[in-house]
Amino acid sequence: MDLKEIQNLIKFVAKSGASEVKLETGDVKITIKTGSDDKETTIVQQVPMGGQQIQQMPAQQQAPAPQAPAQEAAPAAEEKQTAGDDSKYITVKSPIIGTFYRKPSPDKPTFVEVGDTVKEGDVLCIIEAMKLFNEIESEVSGKIVKVLVDDSSPVEFDQPLYLVDPS
């Protein structure tokens, strides 16, 4: 079953008003659910099964597919407005994947707080990756405006950590 066929099946299910449809064919299993939250979920799994089996559940509430993207676009627009407010600041991002720590050890004070002035080369935090503790240094001089990650939280590569006002 190719992507086009799956998309057509999703559209058909949305128009039919069914709340859930399961399709098993060969080594592909597809479950399409439409629920009261007006979103659709498609799950595609590889399973060792033979034959074709379709099961249709009774409709609880019709949830057409075109409504879901419109609802998801609203939070994205809000994020863009918020990001526009921070455009004058420089974002310090994580250079590696790991665990973010604001302190050198649990009994020590944090490296930097909101409102602190930092110089280029000052240590801002530590990111632990594979039992190695990497000091993350500031690449700019300025004032810490916002800490974007909680202490002891996992961080991804290129994830924003701090906002710094360079003025």
Image (tube, rainbow, N blue to C red):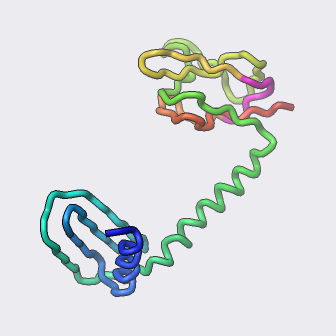
Q: Position of residue 37 (x, y in %)?
A: 41, 71
Q: Is residue 95 magenta?
A: no
- In the picture, the quarter occupied by the N terminus is bottom left
Q: Position of residue 119 (x, y in %)?
A: 78, 18
Where on the picture, by quarter, is residue 144?
top right
Q: Is residue 145 magenta?
A: yes
- In the picture, the quarter occupied by the C terminus is top right
Left or right: residue 63 compared with residue 55: right
What type of secondary structure mainly makes up the magenta span?
strand
Left or right: residue 101 compared with residue 26: right
Where on the picture, by quarter, is residue 158?
top right
Which range of residues does the magenta coloring cover? Answer: 139-146
Q: Position of residue 153 (x, y in %)?
A: 48, 32
Where on the picture, by quarter, is residue 137?
top right
Q: Position of residue 80 (x, y in %)?
A: 68, 56
Residue in the picture at 76% in, 49% down: 85
Closer-to-camera residue (114/131): 131
Residue in the picture at 36% in, 72% down: 6
Q: Residue furthest bottom?
A: 16
